[in-house]
Every structure is written in C-alpha cells, then in structure tokens.
Image (cartoon, rainbow, N blue to C red):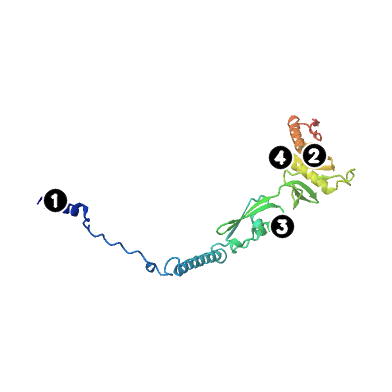
Amino acid sequence: MAGATTAQRGTSDRSGRGGKKRPGPPKPPKPPKSSKSSKSPKGSGPRGPGGARARRVSVLASLAAAVLLAGGGTWALYGSSWLRVERVTASGTEVLTPEQVLTAAAVPVGAPLVSVDTDEIASRLRGRLPRIDSVDVVRSWPHGIGLKVTERKPVLLIKKEAEFVEVDATGVRFDTVGRAPAGVPVLELAAEHSPSARRFDEQRLLREAVGIAGSLPAAIAKETLQVKVRSYDSVLLQLTKGRTVVWGSGELGEAKGRALTALLKAAPKADHFDVSVPTAPAVSGS
C-alpha cells in the first residue's frame, strides 16, 4: 500500500511539476500586413500623373493671374484716365514768371503721366529760356508735373547801345535787358593799346573780369558800379561815392576781397584803395 501511494504521488508530481504546462488563453490574431496590392494605384497619388496635372494647372493659373495683373497695370498707366497729366506748376522763378516757364515747357496736358519725357522738357526749357540755369521736372502722382527752376545770376553787365547783356559767374551771356539790374557792375574794356592785347583777346579779358566780379564780397559787389579792364593784370573797380580800387590781376581774389573789406572799414572817407598786392594794401585820399 505504501508503494502504491508513493507511485501515485510521483505520478501526481510529474503531472503537476514535471509534466507539460497547461495551455493559456488564445492570443488575438495579428492584423495582416499591407500587401503591394493595397497601395494606391499608380497615377492616383500626389506623385503620379494626377499630381503633375494639378501642379500644371496651378502654374498656369498663376501665370494667367500675372498676365492679367500686368495687363491691368499697363492699361492703368497708359490707357485709363486715372494717371494722366491734369496740372503743371512752376516754382523758383525770380525774374521770369511762372507763366513764361509753363509756356516754354509745353508739357502735354492729358498725356499719360508715365509717358512724359522729363529730360526733354528740361532741355526744352533751357533752350527757350537761357536765363534758366537748371530745372528739375518732377512727376507728382497721380495727375501733376512740377517744374523747379533755378535762374542764372548776373555778376557783370556788358553795355550794348542802350541795353545791357547779363553775364553769369561762368561767363555765359544769357539775356539782354533794357535796364541795368541793381548791384551788378558794368564792364568796360579799354585794352586796345595794352602790350598784352595780342596774347589776351577780348574773350579772355571778359573771363578775367567775370572772375573778379564773381569773387567780390557781397557787400562790396553791391557798391561796385564798374569793372574797368585795361590789361590782363590791370583791373580797376569803380565804387559808389567816387571811390576807386586798384585790383590788379584776377589772381588771389579772395585775399584781395578781405583786404579791401578791411580798408573800407578802417578808412571810410578814403577815395583810393590799392589791393593789387593783398599782403601790402594801400589807401589814400580823405
């Protein structure tokens, strides 16, 4: 009996510990892997012919929009009445009048503002009105053109019968007037018998006189009535109140101007001044 009991216990141990494990609960089945046949068919994805067609349509739409915008912009600038010249203004005039400037400019009113040739207008103004030194032609959107004028300033006058020719600081003779402008000296050329007449012709002497007149301090220029040129290095100034100034040549103009200014202050009653050597000026008379 004891042996049987032992055998049964061994059998029981083998079946409980040393035997096979009891099967657990069944695992859920894994989802099947995607096969090649489950992929989107060729041509239906973004990289297929369908996607390429979409891109082409998008590009063509963008190009069409750009063409329409460009065409609309061109029409607005050239074909519409929105951006056309309706008014022209002139500023900066002193001797000239704005009406003279506007007439000479002949800006095409009603033309597309973008088509106005500003360089041509500026050239036309300088050609028709030599008094104009420079002019800025400015578009004032959406309907205006502005003419900003700078006139030439006379520094010397050349008497011609009963009239006066105005000469600017660069030697340009730009206008003839019947009345001498105030504060502008008159040129007198008296160099016919000068030893240097062959070397320095009238045009060269004119340039020297213009240079001297242009270098005078403003206060002295207003009191200068005449610039008398006897030779290249012998120029006299005739001032108001019967005063005369020996200027010499056109060299060292600034230094001579400073010396003359000092002499006029130091000897207000003198009537003769010599600044031909500005480092050693002289004064005489009472």
C-alpha span from label 3 to label 4: 30 Å
Residue ID for mark 3: 127
Residue occupying the point 52% across, 64% down? 66
In the drawing, does residue 140 fall left or right of residue 101?
left
- Measured in 3D between alpha carbons, the distance from the residue under mark 1 to the one under mark 3, in whole angstroms, is 140 Å
Tag 1 near tag 4, CB within 8 Å: no
Q: Which residue is mark 2?
A: 251
Task: Give the mark toward the camera: 3 or 4.
Answer: 3
Q: Earlier in the sequence, mark 1 or mark 4?
A: 1
**Relative to 280, is 152 above or below?**
below
Report the Cα–Cα distance between label 1 and label 2. Answer: 147 Å
Q: Nearer the viewer, residue 244 or 249?
A: 249
Quarter of the image where the C terminus is located: top right
| N-term-proximal mark, 4 vs 2 | 4
Query: Of the residues shown, which amino acid type is indicated by label 3?
Result: Gly
Amino acid type of the residue tagged 2 in the rendering = Glu
Q: 249 and 173: which one is in front?
A: 249
State the residue position of label 4: 218
Secondary structure beneath dot 2 equals loop
At mark 4, the secondary structure is helix
Which label's residue is closer to the chain start, 1 or 3? 1
The residue depicted at 80 percent of the width and 44 percent of the height is 208
* Residue position for label 1: 6
